[in-house]
Amino acid sequence: MATHSQSLSQQQQLSLRLSPQQMRFGRLLEMSAPEFEEELALAIDENPALEAASDPDTAITQKDDEGNNFTESAEDLQRADYANDDDVPYYRTNISNRSADDIHYRPEAVDNSALLIPSLDRQIDELELPDYLRELTKFAAASLDNNGYLTRTPQALADDMAMSAGIDPDPANMVEAIKIIRGLEPAGIGAENLRDCLLLQLDRLEPSPSVYNAIQVIDKEFHHFANRKYKKVRADLGLDETRLDEAVKVIRSLNPKPATVLENGDDDRMSHISPDFIIDTDADGNVSVSMADRLPELVVEESFRRRSSDPAAEAFIKARRNEAEEFIGMAQRRYNTLMAVMTAIVRLQPEFFKTYDCSTLRPMVLRQVADETGINLSVVSRATAGKYALTPRGMVSLKSLFSESVSDAGDISVYKIESALRKLIDSEDKSSPMSDDAIVAALAAQGMKIARRTVAKYRERMGIQPARLRKIE
């Protein structure tokens, strides 16, 4: 006899829902200086209650230590430290028009992944996606490394999002988001590793016998191909020398680091990077931070400050006034947040902002900036994404200032290890290149005691081949 039972259970789940205001502030915070200037101009154009109290090219809204507004121009603030215009250094002049062909611009200091993310965001915005999936896809895109690879698992990305943004996504939805990224431009983006990256690019090529053979080589014989065991590859795949050569030519035409295609800027908007901050260091090592954008003082238009006896008109006036006040508050909050984050970064990296030498960078993660400022971790992440600082030594992306410590080397940053490793490789005898063990010993002599596996890890990440493949007869 069948039995039936009923039960009642309760389940408690903690979730965080962002308000429209919070989402809009997050979007404003992520914007670069030029993007925010465009957003501000659009807001003024669309809302008659919002106006610029002064010329946007000459005034900037800030608050002094007592919370009072002052509207000295950005140029006035920058030039006040100099006796005359002739004393103003190059990086204080025409900052908004500085481009990649400027002789003082340092393109090598620009992080390719920071260029890539805005491009991916634009492509994602052009897709017809549900809001939740769009947000997941953008979050995953922001997790790409400098080469354009996505080495985090869907579960790890979901956990990251739960911790940083307070959103607990289904890993299955994160898998879907990753698939979307892998279909974006440039080809190869979102790959797990080099083999995966090459296959993604090959899949997009026009079908041909040489492309098919190239796919077979990478898919089935990648290890042998990478170690140049061409005879083994030919034997396993049944290819003659001519067909393998044609396949190899196809493979060599691919880009193992897809993020670097933006280094020269295939998008005109990418080739002109405007700074968000200006950093100065005086002779005594004192560092000053200022915002680079020149924004107008925003106020509520006078006629919208008065009440109307007409209920319909009063409702319109109130709605527009509230929108204007909300935008003014967000603009001020954006300024305060960005300045707090940049100032904290300067405090956490004192040696770098004295020398501007990447080898002096300390290990630093977003959590440290969040703890230093008391600002939420997800807000810090948005405040640093795609942002640049103009220094006396050139342009630097904020993202490039972050790195984790090397686990087996104590308080030594990845940049210091990579810099020392690069110098050793560049100066080695090419007829007898250094083995990983020899590199370990050389680094230990410099006070960096790290394991052989760590050397191999960073050598591979930098695209440096093992000693036997670096040897030149």
Image (cartoon, helix red, strand yellow):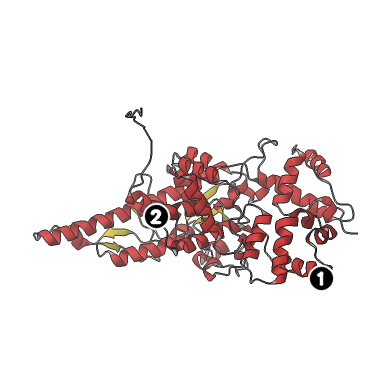
Residue 150 appears in the figure: yes
For residue 307, above or below residue 103: above
Disc 1 residue type?
Thr
Determine whether, in the image, residue 315 is placed left or right of residue 423.
left
Q: Do the numbered discs 2 and 1 sit on residues whose CB atoms are within 8 Å?
A: no
Of residues 36 and 203, the one drawn nearer to the viewer in this rendering = 203
Q: Quadrant of the C terminus?
A: bottom right
Quadrant (top left/top right/bottom left/bottom right) for the N terminus: top left
Identify residue type, mark 2: Asp
Which class describes the residues within 10 Å of circle 1: few (<14), some (14-19), or many (20+)? few
Q: Residue at (13%, 57%) from the top-left corner?
A: 307
Q: Which residue is mark 1?
A: 242
Check disc 1 and report its element: helix, strand or loop.
Answer: helix
Q: Separation of disc 2 and disc 1 at Cα?
A: 50 Å
> Image check: 347 left or right of 207?
left
Badge 2 local density, few (<14 within 10 Å), some, or many (20+)? few
Residue of label 2: 131
Residue 391 can be seen, yes or no: no
Q: Is residue 22 left or right of residue 379?
A: left
Give the x, y percent position of residue 374: 44, 38
The residue lying at 64 percent from left, 40 percent from top is 405
Q: Where residue 182 sits: x, y (%)?
A: 56, 58
- Using the rendered view, name the quadrant where residue 197 is placed: bottom right
- Considering the numbered disc 2 on the image, is that residue within a helix, a strand or a loop? helix
